[in-house]
Amino acid sequence: MLLILHILIILSLSLNACMIRNSVIPAEKENLLNLEVLGAYLVADGNLIEVRYRIKGFTGKALNPHETYIIDESTGELIHISKPPRLPAITSDRPSPANFIVFQNRGKRLKDGSLITVVIGGLRKENVRIVASGEF
């Protein structure tokens, strides 16, 4: 009797696993979310870096605002933001309106022409070139 009960539980769990696997986001919607960086600019006499961006794609959930930072590609240094942005759930295939976020450039380490990786809400865009604010 106990053996039959164990077999029924195992069959039930494997059936549930198959049902869950089939209930994820459809393949045509999966991995369509991406970050479009419109520009990265030195502002406030080079003390701040302003990143302008737009999020494109579809997902039914909100992005993680705590995964928002830039990476100096020459050193690998992470530069976090002091207050994470509010990132709404992306529920439409239309691109979000253009947004901006500002990072501190301590010691003015990043210069005009530096390459950074921008991570906003866990979405990543590499090889973004910083330009001086007078050039945009």
Image (cartoon, rainbow, N blue to C red):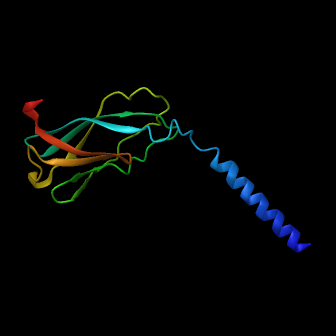
Quadrant containing the C terminus in the rendered view: top left
Left or right: 11 with respect to 130? right
Left or right: 4 with respect to 19? right
Residue 31: x %, y % from top left: 45, 42
Residue 33: x %, y % from top left: 42, 38
Residue 37: x %, y % from top left: 27, 37
Q: Which residue lies furthest to the right in this view?
A: 1
Left or right: 115 with respect to 15? left
Residue 10: x %, y % from top left: 77, 64
Q: Looking at the image, is 32 positioned above or below residue 72? A: above
Q: Is residue 1 visible?
A: yes
Residue drawn 82% across the image and 67% down it: 7
Quadrant containing the N terminus in the rendered view: bottom right
Residue drawn 40% across the image and 39% down it: 87
Of residues 67 and 83, the one nearer the viewer is 67
Of residues 37 and 66, the one nearer the viewer is 37
Q: Looking at the image, is 41 positioned above or below residue 75? A: above
Of residues 65 and 4, the one nearer the viewer is 4
